[in-house]
Each structure stands twice: as structure tokens, then as C-alpha cells.
Amino acid sequence: NAKKMRIKHATENVRVTPTAGFRTVSPKEQLMLDYVEKFRLQFVELYPTRRPLLLFPPNECAVNKFVCTTVRPSQLPFTDLYDHPSCIRFVADFLKYEVLENPIEYPENLPSPYSVLTWQAGDCFDFSSVLVSLLTGVGYDAYCVMGYAPKAVTFSDQELLTCPILEREAALRLAEANRPKPKPEVATKYRVKEALALESNFDREMYDKEMARIMEEQRQMEQDRIAAEEEEARAEVQSDPDEFLGRRVHCWVLVMAGQREIPENFFVEPSTGRCYPCGESPYEGVEFIWNHTNFWVNMQESTVKMDPSKPGKIGFPDIS
């Protein structure tokens, strides 16, 4: 595992970490960890069938740190990263995504965003901590979300999704079509008349109709080809059932409305840079969320149900 090798190198080499805070725990941090441990014990006692909480995982130096301290609001000296679309694209393109070693368990270590950017690689938890750190640093209300996702999402498999380049091109065409047209110039008697074009209107209309017919046939053939490929891919997925269906651990990002003129809440898949409305996301459930200030656990009784076939598995049918 590449992440384990990087963690081992950081643990054995003191020069890799920039400050001593990576390798030590201050008295205030220890006091906070004591409070967090008490909370964890109470949670385990009251909800024995719930998945254990990821509260103080070891960092890259094998030192236990409160999970909220892994989010470090940061403002980089690049103005292109001050808006969320470019910031999301930067994380998705700059870092190399690695799947979790065990798909149904938390990662053994949760390194700092500094180390993840230095390594230029990480899993979904590392991607989320980096993206939330950058978004909160420029004023967004962002959170890391731990929950469950289908296999395609956890493997960053976009085979069944539309190419993002085509989506951007379609958005540009729509914006161009909705752009107000300039007002026509008012003709004056002092303007020199243009020479008449000696061209048959009938021939031009017939040519335009023929070109429109050819373009429509090509568009329809392309749509049929894409639909056939998607149907074939879905058939392959259905023929290969996932043994960890509904239990694959994943981490993504939630951006809340209110700050930086965000009109509504939405999820971000940090490995691909795709954004989803909360009610139309591919994610299967949420256990807890956190940022640099606090940690929240999903305690909605109406959205939590026990699965009797798999003790300890909890389903979240709808939490939007």
C-alpha cells in the first residue's frame, strides 16, 4: 500500500514534518482528547450497534489527533483558487486518488493536508480534508462527510457518467443561447447600400435543410451509441453484484448555503470534482460530518433504521 509506505517514511524521518506539533500532543490537545474519549465511550454504550466514530485517528507520525484538527483553513496565494469550481477542480486534478485498502473500514491514518499536498496522493478522506481546508480558508461553509457510497463512487469510476468536458460545452452553449442578442442597427439614408448577392434563395434553403438533416442523423447516431454503451455497462454492473453493497465507507464534502453567495447546499465528490444537489447525489448514507470547529453525528431517529440481516449495519434512506 502506497499510503502505508508514505506514513512509514514520515514516522521514521523527522525532517519530513515541518513542526514538532506533528509528533507531540500539547496539554490542551490532551485535555481535548480526554473529553473526546469520554464522548466516545458514552456513544458506544448508548448505541452499541452503530459504527464506531472516527474521532482521533493517528496522523502521519502515528500520533493520535482529534479529527477536527486535520482541517486547516488555508488561503493559498493563487486567486484562481478563491472560487469553489476552480478549487474543486484543482484538488481533483492535482492529487492522485487511491482507494481505501479495506472498503468497509476507516483508513488507519489520517494525515494533515500539508502532507497530502506534499505527497500529491491520498484516499477519499485525504482529498476531503484538503478540499475543506481550502474552501473554508476562502470563506465557504464546508464540511467533511463520512458515510457510504456505491462501488463506482469509491473507485472513482466514471464509466456511466457523461464526460465533464461535454457537460461544460453544453453549459457554454446554453449560456450562449440565453445571452441577449444585440439590437439591430437602424438603417439611415446616408448609408451605402451593400451589393446584392446573386444567389438563389431556393438553393440556399435546400442546402440548409440537407445540412440540418445530416447533423440530426449524426446527433441521433451518437446518442444511440452512448445509450448502448451505458446500457452495456449497466448490464455488466448488474451481472457482477457488489459483496459490500451499502457498506462501502467513503468520505466526501458538503458545502452549505449562506456564505460566498451559495444559494443551496450541495455535495462534492473530491476525487472527480463533480457536484451534486443533496437530494440527487449517489451517496447511500451519512454517519457523521466535521470541520475545523466541531463534530456532528447523525442522530435522526426517522432516518436511521437497523438492518436485521447484518448486525451493526445502519441504513439512511433519506437525510436530505
Image (cartoon, rainbow, N blue to C red):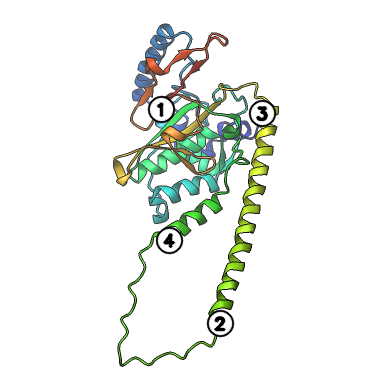
Q: Nearer the viewer, mark 3 or mark 1?
A: 3
Secondary structure of the residue carrying numbered label 4: helix
Q: At which x and y percent is residue 234?
A: 65, 34
Neighbourhood count class around disc 1 (C-alpha, 10 Å): few under 14, some 14–19, many 20 upward: many
Q: At which x and y percent is residue 303?
A: 41, 18
Q: Amino acid at mark 2?
A: Ser
Q: CA distance from mark 3 to mark 2?
A: 57 Å
Q: CA distance from mark 2 to mark 1?
A: 68 Å
| Residue 79 drawn above or below residue 157 | below
Query: Nearer the N terminus, badge 1 or badge 4?
Result: 4
Q: Quadrant of the N terminus?
A: top right
**Residue 279 in view here:** yes
Q: Quadrant of residue 178?
A: bottom left
Q: Which residue is mark 4?
A: 177
Q: Quadrant of residue 256?
A: top left
Q: At which x and y percent is residue 137?
A: 36, 43
Q: Which residue is mark 2?
A: 200
Secondary structure of the residue carrying numbered label 2: loop
| Residue 300 drawn above or below residue 2 | above
Q: Which residue is mark 1?
A: 289
In the figure, is residue 102 to the left or right of 168? right
Q: Nearer the viewer, mark 3 or mark 2?
A: 2
Q: Amino acid at mark 3?
A: Gln
Q: Nearer the viewer, residue 208 or 34?
A: 208
Secondary structure of the residue carrying numbered label 3: helix
What's the residue at 30%, 42% (across, down)? 259
Q: Which residue is mark 3?
A: 238
Q: Nearer the viewer, mark 4 or mark 3?
A: 4
